[in-house]
Image (cartoon, helix red, strand yellow):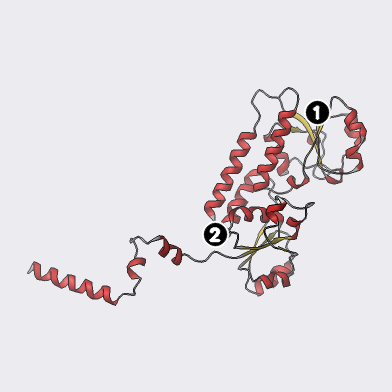
Amino acid sequence: MRHAAALILAALTVQIAACAPPDAAATAPGLSRTPAQAAEAAPPLPTIVSLNPCTDAILAEVADPAQLLAISHYSHDPRATSMDLPVAMRFPATGGTVEEVLALDPDIVVAGAFLPPAARAAFNNLGIRVETFGIASSVAESLAQVRDVANVAGHGEDGERLAARIENVLTAAEPAKDQPPVRTILWQPGGIVPGDNALVSELMRRTGFTSYSAEQGMGQADYLPLERLLADPPDLVLVAGQERMQRHPSLAEMDSMHHARFDPALLYCGGPTIVRAAGRLAAIRAEMPGT
């Protein structure tokens, strides 16, 4: 009797398998798939147009090249790019008009937080998903943004790898504990200084510099006159602008004050830009006397 029941059960199993779709066995829960079957079953990765130079740089690192249909025109401009120009030139650029983006037919538009409401509404009406990202003002915010942008592109693991690389570079750029911090002013384009809560200010602190402008009670985008700088000189001036006063001969004549160039492209974005900024700050710190 038990043997007969087993034969009946086997026959039913064969009949059920015969009625199932051809790929039912491959897709049944708990059964393994071949890599080809898994790739075929996975949803396609979204195509993306980026309208923001900071997200341009992140997406160039974490997305597949074929996904990134275009980046912002800022990244093709040597004065505005936050990524290496040869890397940026691998991707088409767009001015960000609705017409240009529509011609590219992306699944997602990635933009800054200041995307005009009319443009956002137009993209939504056309069925194009919009994801916006603000300016990261800390390392923690930047790492979260890297992960979020990578997840939008369907590359969460690549976002984690980039975040880990950023953290490792920052750790390596920290000065020895017995090294005193360097009293430093970061003199930006237009003769202004960063606020104490800016991302670049945190990078300076973590790489061994204290903020002269914060010490002087100056805030975000405050203007620093040359006379004020010369009256109470810091140990180091990081010059990120090209204004006449930032190239004044009196700066070089002050033996007690050192100065170094700092690329303006390292000022405004987080993500992979942190890697370059931290490396540059660590190199400048190593050149200071007594280090």
Quarter assignment of residue 218? top right
Q: Which residue is at a point 56% across and 57% down the rendered structure image?
A: 151
Q: Which residue is mark 1?
A: 235
Q: Which residue is at a point 72% across and 69% down the rendered structure image?
A: 119
* SS for callout 1: loop
Q: Is residue 106 left or right of residue 281?
A: left
Q: Which residue is at a point 82% across and 45% down the rendered structure image?
A: 221
Quarter assignment of residue 231? top right
Screen quadrant of the C terminus:
top right
Q: x, y percentage for residue 22?
A: 34, 73
Q: Which residue is mark 2?
A: 154
Q: Is residue 1 left or right of residue 226?
A: left
Other-residue count near label 2 (Cα within 10 Å), few / some / many at <14 / 14–19 / ≥20: some
Q: x, y percentage for residue 289?
A: 76, 24
Quarter assignment of residue 74? bottom right
Nearer to me, 31 or 86:
86
Type of residue at label 1?
Answer: Asp
Q: x, y percentage for residue 165?
A: 58, 43
Q: x, y percentage for residue 245?
A: 91, 39
Other-residue count near label 1 (Cα within 10 Å), few / some / many at <14 / 14–19 / ≥20: some
Mark nearer the N terminus (2 vs 1): 2
Q: Which residue is at a point 58% across and 55% down the rendered structure image?
A: 150
Nearer to me, 173 or 121:
173
* SS for callout 2: loop
Between marks 2 and 1, how big is the CA–CA gap?
Answer: 46 Å
Type of residue at label 2?
Answer: Gly
Q: Is residue 142 above or below residue 95?
A: above
Label ID, residue 254 = none
